[in-house]
Structures are given as C-alpha cells and as structure tokens.
Amino acid sequence: MIRSMTGWGESERDTVVGRLRVEVKTVNHRHFHVSFRTPPGFDRFEADIQGWIRPSISRGHVSYSLSLDRNDTADTEELPELDLVRAARYRDLLRRLTDDLGLAGEVEIAHVAQFGEIFLSPAARHVELEVDPEVIRGVTEEAVGAVVTMREAEGCRLAEDIEGRRVAIAIQLDLVAEGAPKRLVAERDRLRAAVRDLTAQESVDEERLAREVVYLAEKWDINEELVRFRAHLEHFGEMMLVPSGEPVGKRLGFLVQEMHREANTIAAKANDVGIARASVAIKEEVERLREQLENVE
C-alpha cells in the first residue's frame, strides 16, 4: 500500500539533565532532505540522526526538532562560566588594534563583553557528555514511528481516491475503443453521400471509396495507443499494491506522464465527438492523478 509524504510525530523521555523531546514533521519533496533544530551541543548528532531516520522515511522533506527542558537542579547548580583565556586574547587584539591604527581610548569591559564566546553556558559544556546517544536514538525512532503510522493512514485515503481515478480512466478507454470502429463506418457513409450529391449519380466507385476508408483507418488508428494505455493502467494498479514502505511515487509519476502522452495522441486522432469528449475526461483524470501523486512517497 502506498504511503503519503505528510506526517507528524513526537516522543519524550526523561534524562539525567532534563526531559528530552523530539518532534518530526514531513511534507512532500522530490528527494530525501532533513532540516535540524537542536540545542547547543547536539549538532554533533545530526549525521547519526539522519541515519536513524533514513531507513523509515525514504522520500520527503523532514523537519527534525529536538528540545531539552532542563531539570531545576541543573539550572541552579550549573552556572555560566568565563573563558578567561579567550577574553584575554580579545583584550590583547583590541589593544593591538588601537595601537597600530593610532586610535584614541582604552579597551574597556564593554568592548570585550561584546564577544559572547567568552561566556560558557552549562548546556554547551555538559549536555554532550551527559546525554546518552542511544537515548536520543530511541526518542527519535519513536517519533519517526508515529510519523510513519500517520503517513500510512494518509496513504490509504490517497489510494482510495487514486483507484477511483484509475477505474474512471478505464471506463473512458472502453468508450473510446467502442466508438473507434463506428467513426469509420460513419465516415464511409458520409463520403458516399457527398459523392452522390456532387455527381448527382446513384452509383459510387466502391473501390475508390474503400481505398479512402483504408487510408482514414490507418490515419485514425488508435489501437496501439489503447493497448499501451491499458498496459500502463495495469502496471499502475500492480504498483499500488506493493508492500508498505516501498517508495513507488516516482515510478507512478512516470506512468502518469506516459498516460498523458497517450491521451494526447488519442485526442489528436479522435475525429469524433464522443471520442473527443472521452479523451478530455481521460486527461482530466490523469491530471488529478498527477496532483495526488505529488504527495506519494
């Protein structure tokens, strides 16, 4: 069964430094892409996180958010610290700048304090060491599991609509196949009547008329297009039944593209009101299929 590319999931877990929360959202995208939002110190896990997500989500834009609500004890016991070595380096550089450029004034605390790197936050110092990567992995996989469940449920609803479109196309193709031979008979009768009106003769050169009908039959032949279109529809239905989790959106999109090509050819060779109307209906359904498939994994 197909899966949608739209999903959402979250998971939480208590750790020694606070409550860890992961939220994962996915939307449609041509390829697999992940954007991260994590606290300071967690960016080093991004490559691992992407590896934990990839086995479950093969296509779509993934928005990954990780937050940490620190414990009260941690907030009171762990206070910011000063990086004196870095602060002294900034002071010396500023003094060198004033000396070399001949600038007036002394280097003051306000100048050095503008460089935020001299202040070390507790999160940046300790979170990396205190949070077990396996905990992050567990929370991430739980959130991703919720995303997959939602994508599968949405995929079921998409599949119902897509199957209805496929059946509607098959019905219109049957109407085209039924009307195709009749138009040649009608054209033959029209040509015979036109010759009689122009020549005022009852008899018509049947051999010449037969050659003209054969020429039209070759020019208007849509049997190959119908055979290919039905083959695409059958293949489309088979891929809709692949095991859940196997991405088929791109392959289904290619088949829809080929269906659109065949529908245009049938419309160009229609030369019949009924076939022309059926061709328009087919192209409308094919376009709706294309729109739905933009959100299929």
Image (spheres, rainbow, N blue to C red):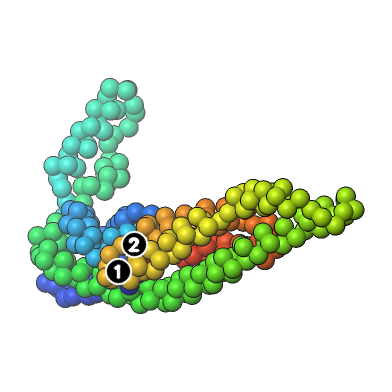
Q: Foreground residue, 229 or 56? A: 229
**Amino acid type shown at disc 2:** Val
Q: Please identify the quarter of the rendering in which residue 102 is found.
A: top left
Tag on residue 248?
2
What SS does tag 1 mark?
loop
Residue type at mark 1: give it.
Answer: Val
Q: How many residues crowd mark 2 within 10 Å: few (<14), some (14–19), many (20+)?
A: some
Nearest the eye: 107 or 25: 25
In the depicted structure, whether residue 218 falls above or below residue 173: above
Residue 134 vs residue 294, the one in the foreground: 294
Report the residue marked by disc 1: 242
Residue 24, percent from left and from top:
30, 67
Marks 1 and 2: in contact by CB < 8 Å? yes
Q: In which quarter of the image is residue 122?
A: bottom left
- Quadrant where the N terminus is found in the figure: bottom left
Q: Which of marks 2 and 1 is in front?
A: 1
Give the quarter of the figure containing the C terminus.
Answer: bottom left
Q: Can residue 8 be seen in this view?
A: no
Distance between the Cα atoms at labels 2 and 1? 8 Å
Query: Observer-nearest residue: 69 or 35?
Result: 35
Asked if residue 18 lies left or right of residue 200, the reply is left
